[in-house]
Amino acid sequence: MPDQAAILLRIADALDRIAPPPPPVVDWLAHPAYVWQGHATHGVPAIEAPALDLIKGIDAQKAAVVGNVERFAAGAAAHDMLLWGARGTGKSALLRAAVAAAIAAHPGRIALVQAVADAGLAALFGVLRAIDRNFLVFIDDLGFDDGDSEGPRKLRSWLEGGVEARPANVRLAVTSNRRAIVERHMREQDDPINPRDAVDDQLALADRFGLSLGFHVCSQDDYLAIVAGYAAHHALAFEPAEALEWSRRRGARSGRVAWHYVTELAGRAGRRI
């Protein structure tokens, strides 16, 4: 007859595999950044971001974001932020760089939390409310499908007035490819009753952000300045004509395209960046 202790041990092992132990408690004071997934959270030991002086072509947006994050880290009044516009224009990179700079200036006073809109933000706010630290909750590339009314309503509630609104030590930073965030269609303009109601309702969501900044396709000169900044930082030579041809083949001029070109230069030179 099999040993009963061995049988019980196998049963315990099977139960552990079915119901693993709960994840370890997160130390919300230990890291500069975190990733919140609703069911699990982990700390990030360092924020990957370019140096602020390498972010070019968006000087006005950079000044506004850096100033707002700096004030928040220092404990002053600060805005929720909506960064909207063309892909690859530096929205998320600027947010990460601004938080990294604020952490360097105010160690331990602020942290970045990356989340998604449908991953239990209300629960996250409940957790962060009790922590003696400021948190910038970052939602990247936000957009709602046509017909989704619950998502925008929740976001409006989190920003202002709702019972689950974000606490005083939390600010939201959202990036989106369009200012209205919600899908818009030409049929909105054909509404025979009030052709502006639907559009105004969608833009009302963007208006809840105290700081709303547009990011647009950069000019040729700005694109070359971005390339030159990255190339000089990594001691790489480049030809402006080739850099422009690189952007034409990709159909865009942006900070992302410039970085991809500099990565190509580094690869040719046998370098890592």
Image: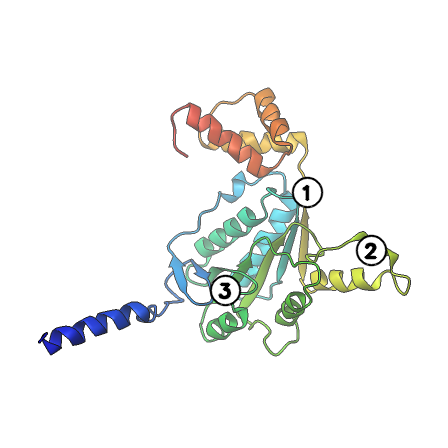
Which residue is at 79% across, 60% downward? 199
Q: CA distance from mark 2 to mark 3?
A: 40 Å
Label 2 secondary element: helix
The kind of residue on which mark 3 rests is Phe
Q: Quadrant of the C terminus?
A: top left
Would residue 48 be found to the left or right of residue 169 on screen? Answer: left
Q: CA distance from mark 3 to mark 1?
A: 28 Å
Q: Which residue is mark 3?
A: 135
The kind of residue on which mark 1 rests is His
Say few, some or many: other residues with alpha carbon within 10 Å of mark 1 (under 14 / 14 to 19 / 20 or more).
Answer: some
Q: Which label lies toward us, 2 or 1?
A: 2
Residue 215 horizontal/vertical position (percent)? 66, 46
Q: Which residue is mark 1?
A: 216
- Choose between 222 and 76: the one closer to the eye: 222
Which residue is at 47% across, 52% downward? 100
Q: Which residue is mark 2?
A: 187
The kind of residue on which mark 2 rests is Arg
Residue 245 horizontal/vertical position (percent)? 61, 23
Which residue is at 45% across, 56% downward? 103
Does residue 155 sit above or below 234 in this rendering?
below
Label 3 secondary element: strand
Q: Quadrant of the N terminus?
A: bottom left
Residue 227 is drawn in which quadrant?
A: top right
The reply to whether discs 2 and 1 touch (Cβ–Cβ < 8 Å) is: no
Residue 232 shows in the view? no
Residue 257 horizontal/vertical position (percent)? 57, 34
Q: Identify the mark nearer the N-term, 2 or 3.
A: 3
Say few, some or many: other residues with alpha carbon within 10 Å of mark 3 (under 14 / 14 to 19 / 20 or more).
Answer: many
Q: Identify the mark nearer the N-term, 3 or 1.
A: 3
Q: Identify the mark nearer the N-term, 2 or 1.
A: 2
